[in-house]
Image (tube, rainbow, N blue to C red):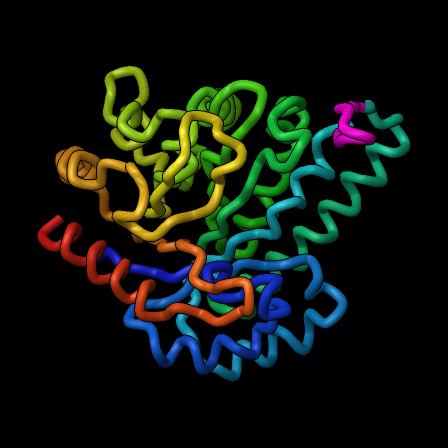
Amino acid sequence: MNQILCSTGALIGRPNNRDYRLLKGLAEELSCDGFEFMVYDTWYPEAEEMIETVKSFGLRIPVIHCEKALSEKLAGGSAGYVDGSYYYRERTPEEDRESVDAALEEFRLNLRIAREFGADRMVFHLWNGIISDRNLEHNIRHFGTLRRMAEKEGICLMAENVVCNTVDPMTDLARVRDAYPDATFVYDTKMAEFHGQTMQLFTPAWDWMLKEGHIRHLHINDYGGGIKDWGNLKVLPIGKGHVDFDAFFEKLKTYGYRGDYTVEATAFDRSGTVDTAMLNECFANLRGRIEGM
């Protein structure tokens, strides 16, 4: 049966000091089947304590979301803004080796967290941040190494259709498939809608992702902005944006999708208070849509 997971990133963020200890009480108020655990790099110095504390809660965590910015270290360059002006700089070979080595070390820690929590899947942002997919060939090359590391731990590493600023997520995932014919993906409805691509998944040009079994997991989130509307990136609850979920799930049923789902709608406000009732409404909405699939 398809399982509905809640992203811990929907519960734990900067307003509540990314306090993973809050998960115990929050989990008791949620009607999901388990959790997709979002890793933050601010936890690295206290990784041992974090792992043991979260394990003591007895939560079901089948999916880990790898720390988002890790892939920026694999990109072969750095990008950003200074005084409002964009810059990009290629790393020297020595800088690149150091950056990649640091990324691999961090990835090992993410894998350890996944292993300790009993996860068998990991969500990965293969491109991310300001540099985004500008140097995607670098990231794709290193992705093979990361996949092999994950496979040794019994973990399926899944690239996500993350928003990008150079090409578009579907085209970038196709490049990943070209390099690794058995690559697996996470498909996020909000990320897709940001690029006007949500329903393209079901077109003849792109439905190979479902037909060939590349999509192993779905993130079901809403979006309220326009195409590449960078000022409206907030993850919304189901029904609070303009994703056509009726059409999406009607089409999805015809492909026999058997994977799980994660709800990521941001549930904390500026004070850090979490709206668990809103998340439970999302789970109920989603559960009604996938019954009988």
Q: Name, please, the residue furthest toward the top.
A: 205
How many marks do you count on the picture?
Answer: 0
Position of residue 45 in the picture relative to residue 212 (left or right):
right
Position of residue 170 in the picture relative to residue 116 (left or right):
left
Return the residue nearer the eye: 280 or 240: 240
Q: Quadrant of residue 18?
A: bottom right
224 within the magenta span: no
Figure quadrant of the N terminus: bottom left
Residue 50's place in the image compared with 290, above or below, is below
Position of residue 167 in the picture relative to residue 17 (left or right):
left
Return the residue nearer the eye: 258 or 244: 244
Return the residue nearer the eye: 246 or 108: 246
User: Residue visible at 50% across and 57% down?
Assistant: 64
Q: Name, please, the residue furthest toward the left.
A: 292
- Residue 119 in view: no
Return the residue nearer the eye: 102 or 9: 9
User: Residue visible at 49% across and 75% down?
Assistant: 23
User: Residue visible at 53% across and 33% down?
Assistant: 230
Residue 58's x, y, as percent?
44, 80
Residue 266's x, y, as percent?
44, 56
User: Residue visible at 40% across and 76% down?
Assistant: 27
Q: Quadrant of residue 80?
A: top right
- Residue 61 in view: yes
80 within the magenta span: yes
Residue 179's x, y, as percent?
52, 23
Residue 35's x, y, as percent?
41, 65
Tell me which secondary structure the magenta stretch mostly adopts: strand
Q: Quadrant of residue 249?
A: top left
Position of residue 3 in the picture relative to residue 54 (left or right):
left
* Residue stretch in magenta: 79-88
